[in-house]
Amino acid sequence: MRRGDTRIEAVVTAVRAGIASRIYGPGTRLPSVRAQAKAMELSVSTVVEAYERLASEGVIASRPGSGFYVTGAAAPLSLADIGPRLDREIDPLWMSRQALETGADVLKPGCGWLPSSWMYEEGMRRALRAAARADTPMLTDYASPLGPAELRQLLSRRIAATGVDASPEQLMLTESGTHSIDLVCRFLLEPGDTVVVDDPCYFNFHALLKAHRVNVIGVPYTATGPDIDVFEAVLQEHSPRVYITNSGLHNPTGAVLSPVTAHRVLKLAERADMVIVEDDIFADFETTHAPRLAAFDGLSRVILIGSFSKTISASLRCGCIAARADWIDSLIDLKLATTFGGGRLASDILLMALTDSGYRKHMESIRHRLAEARERTIARLRPLDIEPWLVPQAGMFLWCRLPEGRDAGDLARACLREGVVLAPGNAFSQSLSAGNFLRFNVAQSSEKKIFDTLSRALSKRKPL
Amino acid sequence: MRRGDTRIEAVVTAVRAGIASRIYGPGTRLPSVRAQAKAMELSVSTVVEAYERLASEGVIASRPGSGFYVTGAAAPLSLADIGPRLDREIDPLWMSRQALETGADVLKPGCGWLPSSWMYEEGMRRALRAAARADTPMLTDYASPLGPAELRQLLSRRIAATGVDASPEQLMLTESGTHSIDLVCRFLLEPGDTVVVDDPCYFNFHALLKAHRVNVIGVPYTATGPDIDVFEAVLQEHSPRVYITNSGLHNPTGAVLSPVTAHRVLKLAERADMVIVEDDIFADFETTHAPRLAAFDGLSRVILIGSFSKTISASLRCGCIAARADWIDSLIDLKLATTFGGGRLASDILLMALTDSGYRKHMESIRHRLAEARERTIARLRPLDIEPWLVPQAGMFLWCRLPEGRDAGDLARACLREGVVLAPGNAFSQSLSAGNFLRFNVAQSSEKKIFDTLSRALSKRKPL
């Protein structure tokens, strides 16, 4: 056996082992030839030869311009197979898994939620104690299809405070905010439809829409809402079915819609007969409520999504959908078909936590702490030459530009090795034009280690 | 204006009002001409004329052999629009909504769950009290993507008791049993694929598969599993992607798979490269465990679904999926994309309830009570000439044949008017060949009123 052969065989064996152990599941992209060569201290041509051999056996397959992927004859559909695959480390799903999987010792300035200690723990404890003494049906029964009436009445009043008129009959409870959006997408979309998102937008919209196999078009987001000229052009050219956006505080930028932009967006949506899904899960963080599209529109073509995972508890799953009564009626069918009845426990605990006199005070304190954390984080990022794109009025996010020429993906990889999970900009960007942005969660950015790690990573020689 | 015109106008106005008030949403079938005529005390020809007029205006549209439906130009997709529409009163979604919507005063021998008072209430109260004292993360945080490890370890051991070898890494927690099946369908199916179900089968499979827009083919279910000759022919002719069935106790019949049928089903599935989804939510009701396809197959092409909504609490939403590790990995992505993180609270409460020493005793008592209720229900149905198709070893269901020539749909409508929700056979039957069957839940059949109502309805003159 020639010496080259042994080396090629070593690569082949390593890849096979990875597939057998399912480190490389069907559809997984193998490390690039260059990366593999470097990792195994072999020449690029050896790795190319090994990959070609595996490809000729059908174990892997190449996709032009995109690398080698593990095949899988009868492999079921995986999200990874749908649409173009990003760099795994800035893939929206990779980000979610990193943030959710890692232990308490890992710092997560990139994650999208408050630290446990900031959540409404006392309210949860009180509600759980009350639940332990509640009537039997609350403990054991399915909820009614819409969800318990008392919670819907309360949510109807709470939503009214943001200017949106939604009767309790126009509200359906779900398992979570994301579940709400998923149901609405199933209701409105067919594979191949076009959906407009903000660029940047909440990264999980990309993963969710990928699962629905629709075409996604991003419209640049400005400090007062979507760039209205681009928005108009996109509507004319692509006839999208749906526009998914945030109400109030925009994720990741922290910007809010101006009334004039809101009005124009609605007029254009009307002309294009497009439905708008307004994800309003950060409402309780606002100090004053920004304009809601649903308020102007009167829930005619706008569907509003709510959740309490960001303020009360992410452990308690409960979201809601506010929409036209006839749409709610169809959404009930879809909910029953795909999750059957909801539970009463989560919604009843939520009701108790929300009506508890402590919640208002809790949120007041959270808003105050966030304002402080925002200032502190901005001050600590400044020496690193990391600047916020704008200083938000409220909320937990800062959308920050890196020093000229630095890549957020590289930085995220480097920091992850030191136990710091960042949120690189391109995970939020449909056009992948936010490669030099990071989203910081100011509530998760109190540790000095975060800024030390960032500083070290930034001080390294720029990759060529 | 001619007198006939006024009458036609009255019908037109009534239908328009129904549409405006959204009693008739887009896609809704209007009352039949005959029913409308009777309700408004008009002639059939008047109603025909009115419907034709509305159809010519595009407000409604006729579907040959199926009646008139409300149109809706920009109406989003509703489940009602997908596939053939059944008689609303035996539509699987109608059944779910009836059972979930109606109040405590309505009797539900047709529903699919135990009465509140039979559930594991004491265990739930203990677990809630413990949860109120738990560490903060349990009260406030997202779960890890797979779900808490301790619960998966416990479920792995519990599943082993049914002969299925599933490591904790092969288990993913979900929001419910139905949510599990929905995720698996999203993972395995594309619109237009073919899926095999038992005929009869759990009625919500029909609604769920309708939402996935797949072709559904029923295979007659015998006392020992699917009719294996028909099963083989269907696999050959239609190359289905998936077979969805129950493990252990079959819903609605209460039959169990024989080892020989299990072996044949697996051999045929292997030859046809078909995946099997085994819905195992009634495992704790069995006195001895029937053969599981997943046990024979070793989770190679079988995916097992679990839930505790039927034994501990339906109010606490938590289900699980056991599958090949590489499939689980793709299912995690799909779960995160469509519901983001699960909650820790439900799974941690479930863990406490399951490890509580009382659960085993609770289920022993439930099995005992069900055996008594089964005998009592059979005895009370006998004088009505309603006979079980077989007497199940365990579980809550009795699949019963009505007296010759009686229609379960008619009976269900008549009894509903008197506050008794029945489960007519055709909701469970893909071929609509179970029109003279009803499914009884013996735990929900203790009230004398149920049998009195049935008796009155049966004693009425048969409809022509």
Image: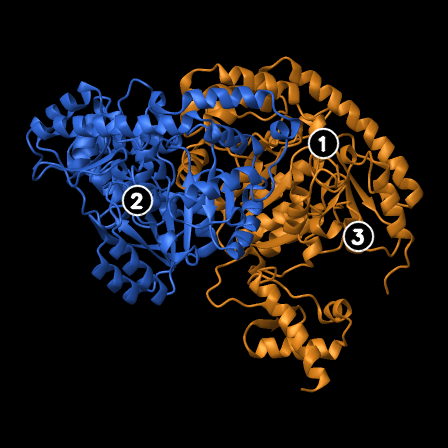
Chain colours: A orange, B blue
Residue A9, located in which quarter of the rendered image?
bottom right
Task: Tell us which disc is closer to us: 2 or 3.
Answer: 3
Q: Quadrant of the C terminus of chain B?
A: top left
Q: Which residue is mark 3?
A: A408
Residue at the image position 32 percent from the left and 35 percent from the top: B285
Residue at mark 1 to residue at mark 3: CA–CA distance: 23 Å
Residue A85, located in which quarter of the rendered image?
bottom right
Q: Amino acid at mark 2?
A: Ala
Q: Residues within 10 Å of mark 1 (few under 14, many from 20)?
A: some
Q: Secondary structure at mark 1?
A: loop
Residue at mark 1 to residue at mark 2: CA–CA distance: 58 Å
Q: Amino acid at mark 3?
A: Ala
Labels 1 and 2 within one chain: no
- Badge 1 vs badge 2, beta-carbon distance below 8 Å: no
Image-based side of B213 in relation to A323, left or right: left
Task: Tell us which disc is closer to us: 1 or 2.
Answer: 1
Q: Quadrant of the N terminus of chain B?
A: top left
Question: Sequence-wise, which precedes: disc 1 or disc 3?
Answer: 1
Residue at mark 2 to residue at mark 3: CA–CA distance: 59 Å
Image-based side of B455 in relation to A12, left or right: left
| x then y, percent, for residue B202 | 30, 42
Labels 1 and 3 within one chain: yes
Q: Residues within 10 Å of mark 3 (few under 14, many from 20)?
A: many
Give the camera-side residue of B283 and B27. Answer: B283
Give the camera-side residue of A280 and B380. Answer: B380
Say above or below: A55 vs A311. below
Q: Is residue B34 visible?
A: no
Image mark 1: chain: A
Q: Which residue is mark 1?
A: A115
